[in-house]
Image: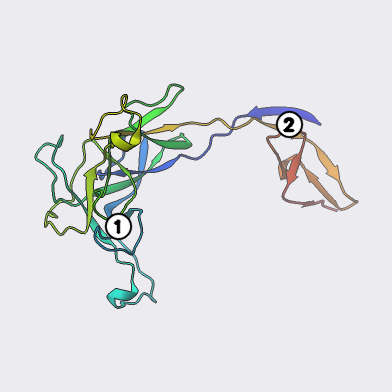
Amino acid sequence: MKSAVQAYPVGPGAIYIRWGKTSCPDKSSLIYKGRVGGSHFDQRGGAANHLCLPDDPEYTAAAQTKGLLTDSLIHVVEYQLNLNHKGGLVNHNVPCSVCQADRRSTAIIIPAKVRCPDGSWTKEYSGYIMSQASPYHGSMFTCVDHSAEAVPGMAADINGVLFYYSSIECSTFGNCPPYKNHASLSCIVCTKQVQAAPISKVSFTYQINESVFFSSDDCIATPSGAVYYQCYYFGISLS
């Protein structure tokens, strides 16, 4: 067997949600956009996470309309804030976009940071950590874009799911400073291309019997320390 080529495969782009925006940053592709939904701030059931619901929903033929008590109801998310946002966003509905980073295979959300780590990390967007206020039922902490937008024509003050700034409570957190008491907590979303282990392509032919064989074109070399080939197809020789 003779090694012919050594390659470093590029992984697929990391997928992340840009909360508060209808578009993706440069060098990221838009998969779909929509609006944010979740469980009501004053109801015990439902879920803590938020959903990015597409603008063009689809339903199966078997979908049914049921009574209120048999469903986990999803409500629209509203901003409950107006600081740092030109014109104010209070009571407006929150949009979202699902993005895929081009040629960057891993993504991370870092709270309390405005810069990405050293080492080839790329900033996708930065913003503020938001969730429902402490007196209400819990929801996930979400990194909302610092230049957040609103869903056009939706500012009815319905109060379904509520986005408030999140902050540190120093009396119980126990690490102040460097954290500040009740200061709006920042966040940043970063991506990075993780280079996979090298794969060596070799040329060989292996004869099983007089009529059946496989060659290097039918095999993949696994990126491990040992020489190992996974062969997924058997060729049939011509006679």
| Distance CA(mark 2)–CA(mark 1) | 47 Å
Residue at left offset 46%, top offset 34%: 103
Side of 233 where 86 appears, left or right: left
Does residue 191 lie above or below 66 as drawn?
A: above
**Residue 195, x across and y down, in percent:** 55, 30
Q: How many labels, in total?
A: 2
- Estimate the x, y position of residue 231 in percent, counting from the top left: 74, 46
Amino acid of disc 1: Gly
Where residue 225 is drawn, which disc sits there?
2
Callout 1: 10 Å neighbours few (<14), some, many (20+)? many
The quadrant holding residue 230 is top right
Secondary element type, mark 2: loop
**On the rendered structure, is 217 left or right of 162?**
right
Q: Nearer the viewer, residue 204 or 103?
A: 103
Residue in front for this viewpoint, 60 or 219: 60
Residue tagged 1: 38
The image shows residue 125 at horizontal and vertical percentages of 31, 34
* Residue drawn at point x = 74 percent, y = 33 percent: 202
* Residue 207 versus residue 226 in the image, above or below: below
Residue 33 in the figure: left or right of residue 208: left
Give the quadrant of residue 112: top left
Q: Nearer the viewer, mark 2 or mark 1?
A: 1
Q: Quadrant of the N terminus?
A: top right
Q: In front here: 26 or 105?
A: 105
Quick one: which residue is furthest to the right in this view?
210
What type is the residue that disc 2 sits on? Gly
